[in-house]
């Protein structure tokens, strides 16, 4: 089917949840995806932070193809070879004790919220009402299902679906005083993205994370860290909280975990998991043999190929190039992030939109988030030469977009728009 006929068919048949770019993708290799005409696009978004090993990585093919032949799915009534193997790796890397596997990020986060409530119920004293409140951060994003949405701050995601799950209060990110003020014995958990992704790659400070850790411990509440976007190596360490010397009680991961197969994981402590009994929570698809076998290959490949060091090194090079670009463009207000989770905040939404689409026209894929922020979540196998090409193109696209933004539109032309 051609792009035009796919567009027509989707417009007639799909619920219009997405506003897609007019590109029909057919293939991927390395850091490139290819459209229906065989044109290559440099992918600096990697399927929104999913394709960490790029496209067509031999280690993924090697894990995927034979396993697809043997066993794709079994229910969670049965054992298979890979859940414990994957849990062994994830617990070793995170410092936590146990795993629950889901299909997506939002489901991992849902599990964390439910387990926090269950843990509080188990530990409520002398018939007192169990702690129930969950603290989340302003500008957070934890997913689209009701529990996750209730802890997601952005009004445009929440409002069409209200009322949401009760018991959530929002705290200003990086405002320790606000966190202290809102912490009390009714709080069962505080949930934090170590680097807020959707809201424009905003790192949470070490001071705030450490304060959250301390307050959670003091009140017997749980610290839940969401690394669905920033975890599993994207910042140059396995987990971004490891830059800050803290250990959460629960951790959620997903996006890059199974190289594009749907898989999420909630990692937690023995203490929390003691509150969960068989039947209390579960999933049909989560943690299937195919997804888990591939996830094991993802982790082993990141280790074998030294990709954490590579992400740190090429990410820092990318960040430096963005800072140099900022020197040439006053419209870049700030460069943020670390490793291969980077962003440039521009001074207007219109400019960011023009740059984003201008880059796509030049066949470089990035993403615009929070209206004004250009976000980069490239595959971990990105090289300096790709960064150079991206920065050179960005420089040219920004120069031209800034020029057109400055040309006043004549009033007669404006009224025709
Ligand atoms: C930090 C964070 N949490 C949760 C989610 C939800 O994950 P999913 O889309 O897999 O449900 C996302 C997705 O972008 C995310 O970035």
Image (cartoon, rainbow, N blue to C red):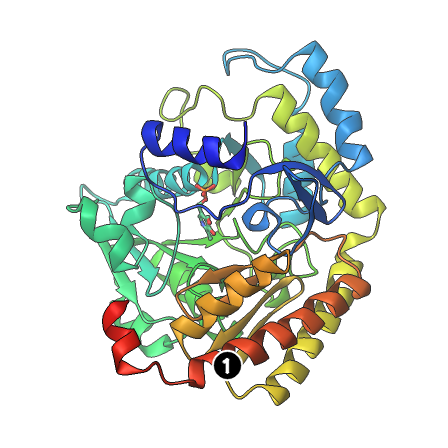
Q: Is residue 122 left or right of residue 32?
A: left
| Image quadrant where one finds the C terminus | bottom left
Q: Quadrant of residue 180?
A: bottom left
Q: Is residue 142 above or below residue 342?
A: above
The residue sitting at 55% across, 57% down in the picture is: 247
Measuring from the top left, give residue 391's x and y in whole percent.
69, 72
- Using the image, determine if residue 216 lies above or below residue 41: below
Query: Are there few (<14), some (14-19), or many (20+) residues within 10 Å of tag 1?
Result: some
In this rendered view, identify the residue nearer to me: 132 or 266: 266
Secondary element under disc 1, as helix, strand or loop, is helix
- Position of the N terminus, as image quadrant, is top right
Quick one: 42 or 138, which is closer to the camera?
Answer: 42
Residue position marked by numbered label 1 in the rendering: 402
Kindly identify the residue that appears in the image at 51 percent across and 54 percent down. Answer: 248
Q: Which percent across, then down, holds residue 352?
A: 46, 70
Residue 181 at x, y percent in the picture: 26, 73
Q: In this view, does 4 lie to the left or right of 155?
A: right
- Picture quadrant of residue 154: bottom left
Identity of the residue drawn at 51% across and 13% down: 75
- The structure residue drawn at horizontal position 63% and vertical position 66%, both measured from the top left corner, is 243
Q: Is residue 161 visible?
A: yes
Quadrant of the rendered structure where residue 253 is? Answer: top right
Residue 161 position, x and y percent, is 20, 44
Residue 185 visible at all: no
**Viewer-proximal residue among 320 and 132:** 320
């Amino acid at each position: 089917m051609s792009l035009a006929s796919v567009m027509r068919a989707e417009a007639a048949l799909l619920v219009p949840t997405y506003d897609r770019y007019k590109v029909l993708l057919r293939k991927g290799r390395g850091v490139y995806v290819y459209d229906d005409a065989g044109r290559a696009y440099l992918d600096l978004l990697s399927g929104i932070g999913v394709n960490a090993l790029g496209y067509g990585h031999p280690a993924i093919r090697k894990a995927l193809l034979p396993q697809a032949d043997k066993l794709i799915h079994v229910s969670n009534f049965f054992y298979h070879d890979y859940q414990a193997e994957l849990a062994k790796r994830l617990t070793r890397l995170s410092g936590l004790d146990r795993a629950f596997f889901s299909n997506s990020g939002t489901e991992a986060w849902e599990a964390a919220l439910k387990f926090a409530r269950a843990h509080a119920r188990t530990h409520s004293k002398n018939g007192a009402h169990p702690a129930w409140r969950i603290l989340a951060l302003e500008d957070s994003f934890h997913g689209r299902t009701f529990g996750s949405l209730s802890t997601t701050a952005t009004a445009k995601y929440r409002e069409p679906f209200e009322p949401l799950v009760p018991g959530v209060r929002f705290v200003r990110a990086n405002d320790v005083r606000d966190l202290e003020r809102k912490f009390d014995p009714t709080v069962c958990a505080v949930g934090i993205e170590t680097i807020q992704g959707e809201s424009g790659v905003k790192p949470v400070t070490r001071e705030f994370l450490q304060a959250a850790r301390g307050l959670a411990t003091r009140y017997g509440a749980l610290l839940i860290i969401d690394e669905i976007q920033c975890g599993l190596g994207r910042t140059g360490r396995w987990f971004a909280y490891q830059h800050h010397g803290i250990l959460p009680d629960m951790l959620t991961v997903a996006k890059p975990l199974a190289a594009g197969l749907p898989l999420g994981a909630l990692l937690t402590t023995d203490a929390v998991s003691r509150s969960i009994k068989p039947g209390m929570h579960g999933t049909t698809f989560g943690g299937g043999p195919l997804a888990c076998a591939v996830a094991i290959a993802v982790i082993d490949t990141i280790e074998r190929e030294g990709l954490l060091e590579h992400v740190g090194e090429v990410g820092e090079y990318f960040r430096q190039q963005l800072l140099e670009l900022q020197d040439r463009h006053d419209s870049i207000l700030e460069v943020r992030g670390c490793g291969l989770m980077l962003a440039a905040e521009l001074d207007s939404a219109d400019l960011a939109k023009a740059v984003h689409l201008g880059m796509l026209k030049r066949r470089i894929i990035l993403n615009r988030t929070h209206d004004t922020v250009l976000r980069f979540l490239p595959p971990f196998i990105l090289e300096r030469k790709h960064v150079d090409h991206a920065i050179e193109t960005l420089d040219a696209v920004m120069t031209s977009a800034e020029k057109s933004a400055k040309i006043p539109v004549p009033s007669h032309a404006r009224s025709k728009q």
